[in-house]
Image (spheres, helix red, strand yellow):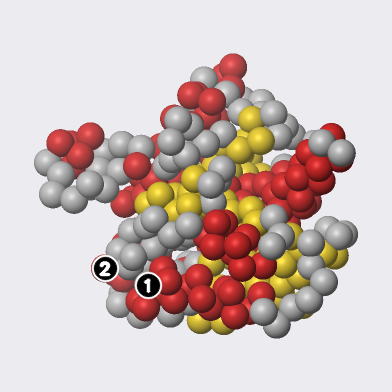
Amino acid sequence: MKTLVFDIGGTSIKYGCCIDGQLSAVKETPTEAQKGGRHILETVASLICTEQGYDAIGISTAGQVDACSGTIIYANRNIPAYTGTRIREELESRFHVPVAVENDVNAAAMGEAVCGAGQGCPDFLCLTYGTGVGGAIVMNGEIFHGSSFSAAEFGAIVTHSEEKLRQKDFFDGCYERYASTTALVQRAMALDPALDSGRRIFENLHRPGVHEILDSWVDEILLGLSSLIHIFNPSCVILGGGVMAQPLILKMIQARIGRFIMPSFAHVSIRPALLGNTAGLLGANYLASRLCEDKQKKREETT
């Protein structure tokens, strides 16, 4: 089975081909998000037109997604006019193959479930730390979408109530305002403007004050993480995002989590995501392949 897969982010669109589950020839092209949702859809369509002999298309994308209809139900101002884009309907009408569309963190979680850190674990949480904090909930091997496909907005957990009560912006007092990689970089730049990326921060941990900033940021991660563990009682939590590739962060979280949770939750396994930038593509492949198989079964049942 051949599936074309796309991972649409605010900066770039990664794309490739999966043949019988094996991902190959991953490339990327600029999203040019400022040109809006229609431009993104046409970019994807133009890439599809260069391929032949495929059975399905899988799309992992930024924004909240109605996974049943394949429609973007909400996207922030980083991608203008993306809300309401009917990706599945338009691509299926053009290319006449099944099209699966899923939120990027949900797709990455399914990639980890099938091919990565979530293998053998039917119930787990997945969090990604980057510009914000993204989340996904996997239950019985399936994404839990909530009543309106908006579940797992973990970045909106309130971790600083006083700031929330004085809010000027919705995310004042919320988890992603303090635990995102953006928050870490902002703290470090207050010490030294040259510490403007995660890489530069980790290169300078020996400097006075830098490790203290990292320590404080890890505590912010644990504040939200402990709340999620107490609510969902997962056996496993998978942490992703570029900064989580630093082994030191995972060690710090694993060493400290016991102070933040009840002893009866201590069995939870905190794991790093294993698939990196391919997780969304592999998840999109899995979802598209399954959609294709379901449609084939329905055709067989009616004949």
Q: Earlier in the sequence, mark 2 or mark 1?
A: 1
Quarter of the figure that contains the C terminus: top right
Q: Position of residue 139 (x, y in %)?
A: 64, 30
Alpha-carbon distance for marks 2 and 1?
34 Å
Residue at the (43%, 40%) spot, across then down? 150
Q: Which residue is mark 1?
A: 36
Q: Quadrant of residue 164?
A: top left
Q: Is residue 90 left or right of residue 97?
A: left
Q: Nearer the viewer, mark 2 or mark 1?
A: 1
Task: Please provide percent x and percent y for residue 106.
Answer: 58, 47
Viewport quadrant of the N terminus: bottom right
Farthest top residue? Answer: 264
Query: Hey, which quadrant is residue 208 in on the image?
Result: bottom left
Q: Nearer the viewer, residue 242 or 124?
A: 124
- Residue 179 in the image, given as x and y percentages of width and height: 39, 50
Numbered marks: total: 2
Quadrant of the rendered image containing residue 82: bottom left
Horizontal side, residue 91 vs residue 36: left or right: right
Q: Is residue 52 left or right of residue 192?
A: right
Tell me the crowding category of disc 1: few under 14, some 14 to 19, or many 20 or more residues within 10 angstroms, Cα based. Answer: some
**Amino acid identity at mark 2:** Ala
Vertical side of 281 occupied by 124: above or below: above
What secondary structure is marked by label 2? helix
Q: Residue at point 54% right, 25% down? A: 232
Q: Residue furthest front?
A: 303
Residue that label 2 marks: 190
Amino acid beneath label 1:
Gly
Label 1 sits on a secondary structure element that is loop
Mark drawn on residue 193: none
